[in-house]
Image (cartoon, rainbow, N blue to C red):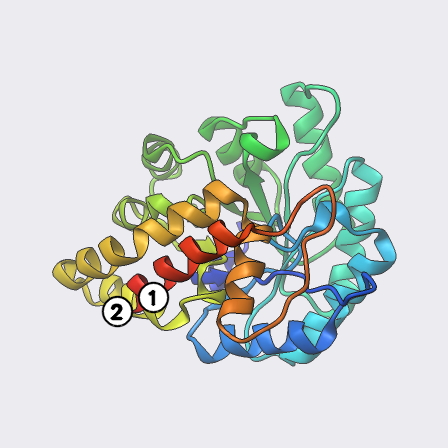
Amino acid sequence: MPASGATISGIVAYPITPFTADGGIDHHSLHLVLDRLVDGGASAIAPLGSTGESAYLDLTEWTETAASTINHLGGRLPTVVGVSDLTTAGAARRARIAEGLGASAVMALPVSYWQLTALEVQKHFEAIAAAIDIPVMVYNNPATAGIDLSPTQLWELVRDVDNITMVKESTGDINRMHQLRELSDGTLPFFNGSNPLALEAFRAGAAGWCTAAPCLIPDQIRAFYDAIQRGDDETADAVFGRIQPLLKFIVTRGLPTAVKSGLALTGIPAGEPRRPLLPATEAEAAELSDLITASVG
């Protein structure tokens, strides 16, 4: 496993993809969000995941967003670009584009209309990894992809394919993280993708937390992670207890909708999510505002 896979750790922040009123990419707002994430202490930036509405962008829009993100960051932080696509060829194409734009790594979710066999998943990821030289993060999120990769499958992909070096585990099952650590003898960098599980995940040995929450409460996420790094359990527990209701809300409502609404409340217009997603209702926005205030307080 190349050492480069271990260079990404900590808070991996997920930006939304802002849209203008006419449906185009709003680069100005995107850059404001990225600056907030950098200034807020994020360790890496991961555009074009679930939060970034990658599934609803065509290839031109996807490429435009990836280029805008990487160029604006200018190397200030590593970038982990989401390259998931319905076909293996499409995912490999996006991976090559991301590498060409200067991405530090890519992340891929196995997405398919048909249920994939273990061999089909393996060949899919082998093809993505073979298309590029930068590290690949395997993303397991059966709630969105409909395909569940076991800890053993995830570890075997990292073990057997040279530049597959990291795993993002988003089932919300802490036992899987313990299994990943045991299978790899603690050598596998795995990342928590379930917001409400962040505290337990770090205590289970997670290398980092992939989250959109820094878009809304960057200082609180940094305070939480700093406490984790110091081994200050009392502060970590207190901060996490305060922010956990917000973390649960944004996941339950849907990350693009909730985070875009929250950004508007905190001074950055991000437009509406792309249909079929709908913007937050007035009641949802009011609840979100209260949760942000409580998290900051």
Residue in the foreground of this view, choosing between 162 and 78? 78
Q: What is the secondary structure assignment of the residue under circle 2?
A: loop
Quarter of the rendering occupied by the C terminus: bottom left
| Contact, mark 1 vs mark 2 (Cβ under 8 Å) | yes
On the rendered structure, is 159 left or right of 174? right
**Is disc 2 surrounded by few (<14), some (14 to 19) or many (20+) residues within 10 Å?**
few
Residue at 79% across, 46% down = 92
Query: Where 78 sits versus 291, above or below?
Result: below
User: Gap between marks 1 and 2, in whole Å?
Assistant: 6 Å
The location of residue 264, given as percent across then percent down, is 56, 68
**Is disc 1 surrounded by few (<14), some (14 to 19) or many (20+) residues within 10 Å?**
few
Badge number at residue 293:
1
Query: Where 214 sits versus 86, above or below?
Result: below
Q: Residue furthest left?
A: 234
Residue at 41% across, 61% down = 289
Q: Report which residue position mark 2 lands on.
A: 297
Q: Determine if residue 113 is in view.
A: yes
Residue at 73% across, 45% down = 55
Q: Determine if residue 169 is in view.
A: no
